[in-house]
Amino acid sequence: MVATVIDAILGNDVSTLLALAEENPLVLKERLQRDTLGGTVLHLATKLGHKEIVETIIKLCPSLVGVTNLDGDTPLHFAARWGHATIVAQILASGYAEFTALNERGETAFVVACRYTRPDVASLILEETSSITIGEFYATFVLGEYTG
């Protein structure tokens, strides 16, 4: 069944994803190795930039927003890395995003956006959070990891 879910995500096929989730809601919680390092279907859809699939997954299983992969990356980290501003906005709007979640490298999604030179994504995250930590400030502005 997992291969079919992966195929639905890879093909950006919302109707197939909905049918599979209706048949077996747990299919959305499967851990994937392909392109996600043990992440979820939301990690994969986020990486690929499939906005409609991401929206569908968040509606069906919003708790996936906070799930980490083996590197400690949440879907918000993935969206920040790949520069998917629309998906960052979707994740932030879900109300389940954890702004201070650190991955295995000790980075928040804000720092990831800065490291990968995604100023539009970094700005979105800053708009939604009341503050950044001194470590984030230092890493991004003092060390020059933020180029925007």
Image: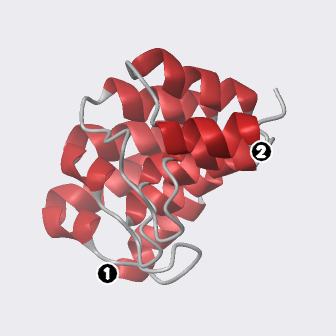
> Looking at the image, which residue is at 62% across and 30% down?
122
Structure colour scheme: secondary structure
Of the 4 image quadrants, the one containing the N terminus is bottom left
Instruction: Name the kind of residue labelled 2 in the image.
Output: Glu
Identify residue for label 1: 1
Q: Residues within 10 Å of mark 1 (few under 14, many from 20)?
A: few
Front one among 16 and 73: 73
Classify mark 2: helix, strand or loop. loop
Left or right of 133: which side holds 82? right
Whether residues under marks 1 and 2 lie with C-beta atoms below 8 angstroms apart, the answer is: no
Of the 4 image quadrants, the one containing the C terminus is top right
Identify residue for label 2: 145
> Looking at the image, which residue is at 36% across and 51% down?
101
Residue 26 location (% of width, % of height): 16, 68
Q: Quadrant of residue 123?
A: top right
Q: Is residue 80 visible?
A: no
Residue 143 location (% of width, % of height): 77, 45
Relative height, residue 115 to residue 147 (above, below): below
| 3D distance between C-alphas at marks 1 and 2 | 41 Å
Instruction: Name the kind of residue labelled 1 in the image.
Output: Met
Residue 29 location (% of width, % of height): 24, 67
Classify mark 1: helix, strand or loop. loop
Front one among 95 and 135: 135
Residue 102 location (% of width, % of height): 41, 57
Relative height, residue 139 to residue 69 (above, below): above
